Image: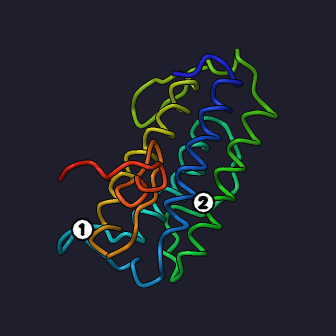
Amino acid sequence: MFTSIVDFKSTYEEEIEGTMKILSALSDVSLSQTVTDGHRTLGRVAWHIAATIPEMSKLIGLDVKGPDEKAPVPKTAAEIKAAYKKASDSLMEQVVSNWSNDTLQVEDDMYGQTWKRGKSLAVIISHEVHHRGQMTVLMRQAGLIVPGVYGPAMEEWEQYGAPPPAI
């Protein structure tokens, strides 16, 4: 749970950067990749991340600009990336400009539970990271190179002068 706007801002800036790295590695063809029949496609998961930001933010009193949760998945990775960037930047701007540390203690009804706004912001980020992890599996299945977010990906170890970890 966040108790300061400064902590939220620094954390979310890093997570936005990580998500943008993942979204930038997508191709239009890869958007149709699924783990198995009857599950979300890679494009649907990416779109879900973008569309959830304004949906969840509305529940905590913010007017975040971004895609409607019911909007169809775009046909291109660039459209998804642009929608995510718009939503994440809007969330950051809304919180930094309109909230104080005290606002993070305000409680809201979130999906039938009562959460402080500082928790809601943490959940928005955790939700994004959770689905970003799902995306990396689908990206590998689609034959894409997955960029490192919290450290080097397998293909990036050489840049650090080290062999990739043993398989």
Indicate the position of residue 85 as horizontal and vertical percent values.
Answer: 66, 58
- Circle 2 packing at 10 Å, graded few (<14), some (14-19), many (20+), is many
Residue type indicated by callout 1: His
| Residue appearing at x 71%, y 50% in the figure | 89
Q: Is residue 42 above or below residue 156?
A: below
Dot 1 alpha-carbon crowd within 10 angstroms: few under 14, some 14 to 19, many 20 or more:
few
Seen in the picture, residue 144 relative to 52 is either above or below; the reply is: below
Q: Tell me what residue is drawn at x 41 percent, y 37 percent.
A: 111
At x 18% / y 71%, what residue is drawn?
36
Q: In this view, does 96 lie to the left or right of 67?
A: right
Amino acid on which disc 2 is placed: Tyr
Q: Name the residue under label 1.
A: 39
Location of residue 94 by image quarter? top right
**On the picture, is 33 further left or further right than 123?**
left
The residue located at (72%, 49%) in the rendering is 90
Residue highlighted by disc 2:
84
Distance from the alpha carbon under mark 1 to that under mark 2: 21 Å
Location of residue 121 in the rendering, given as x and y in whole percent from the top left corner: 56, 33
Q: Which of marks 1 and 2 is nearer the N terminus?
A: 1
